[in-house]
Image: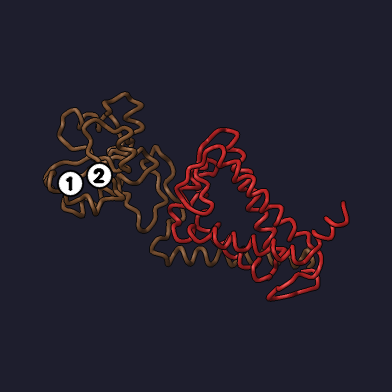
Chain colours: A brown, B red
Amino acid sequence: MSGKDTAKGILIILGLAVIVAFTANFLSPKGIALFGEWDKSQGVVTARAKDDFIVHELEIDNILDAKEIYDKGSAVFVDARARQAYEDGHIKNAISLPVRQFNELIDKFAGQYPTSISIVTYCYGRECEESHELAQYLIDEGYTDVKIFIDGYMCWEAEGYPLE
Amino acid sequence: MNSEVRRLLCSNWLELVARWVLGLTFLYASCHKIFEPADFAKIIYGYYLFPDFSINLIAIILPYMELFSGLALLLGVYPRSAALIVGGMLTVFIIALTINLIRGHEFDCGCFSFGNTGQTDAAIQLLARDTIYLFLALLVIFFDRTRRWCVWRRADFD
């Protein structure tokens, strides 16, 4: 095979890959936007998939605001991370509701916390989406006042705020 | 070079094995990335190497480059071209792994599944594995005899 044929082969394979990739991404329910949001200063990072849970309007993007809500005791902080991560350390008095076990745990949670309460969900920080996913599930369950503390556990710990 | 080694490297059976191993590997590696593009985009972000504007584009295109290169290698359609693409991707993977290994940044390679944040040992294993794959790709690229079991043969040295 000559160099020319090799180059032609590369162009054919790459061309086919690009065409099919963009077509499949456009048609797939799991497709993502051409450009994501990867700047942490703008909020939680996300590929902006068609099926993602990111709602920036629900975000508390200032840790001082989250601390103020915490100090007032006006909302229940809910940890969306896996149970082991919660047990390793969490915001003091936060409730564990791992988003991956939501269906098996929500009935017990709903029995203890009526839908009228204020909830603040969190995960590790601006590189995780579990807090957004959990917030969406809680809203679907009828909770009307749900916010997302996007700086999460890492930032809370770094600030030296209460943990347990 | 020892004549036995030279004979082995020129064997079209060895070339076939190299081509199929690479083809199957890349075909398999593309699947979870195609089904979960958002997760794959996050893996690419986690390397902290690529500019923001490129992350989604890489996540959309790269899995299909793996898929079609893998298929071409398996079927023997433009095998040298496919091996060059695979070799290029492997070179980029090796450079990315090495940079993150040197700076001690733990990350999830996202090669065959998601959610395995790599420790240093795992990164070294990945490097060794990718280097072996790169050797296989070079074997296919520089093979200059008639290849076995090609669906579409353009010339004797295809």
> Horizontal and vertical percent for residue A97?
25, 44
For disc 1, the neighbor class at 10 Å (few under 14, some 14 to 19, many from 20) is some
Q: Earlier in the sequence, mark 1 or mark 2?
A: 2
Tell me the residue that label 2 is attached to. A97
Tell me the residue that label 1 is attached to. A109
> Horizontal and vertical percent for residue A95?
22, 39
Left or right placement of residue A73 versus residue B22 in this view = left
> Horizontal and vertical percent for residue B36?
44, 57
**Image quarter of residue B37:** bottom left
Quadrant the C terminus of chain B occupies: bottom right
> Horizontal and vertical percent for residue B74?
64, 68
Instruction: Looking at the picture, tell me which residue is in the foreground, A42 or B135.
Output: B135
> For residue A22, which numbered disc appears in the image?
none
- Does residue B52 lie above or below B5 as drawn? above
Task: Identify the subunit bearing mark 1.
Answer: A
Q: Amino acid at mark 1?
A: Phe
Identify the secondary structure beneath mark 1: helix
- Tell me the residue at 29%/43% (across/down): A80
Answer yes or no: do the residues labelled 1 and 2 have beta carbons within 8 Å? yes
Distance from disc 1 to disc 2, alpha carbons, whole Å, reads 8 Å
Q: Amino acid at mark 2?
A: Leu
**Image quarter of residue B13:** bottom right
- Tell me the residue at 52%/35% (across/down): B105
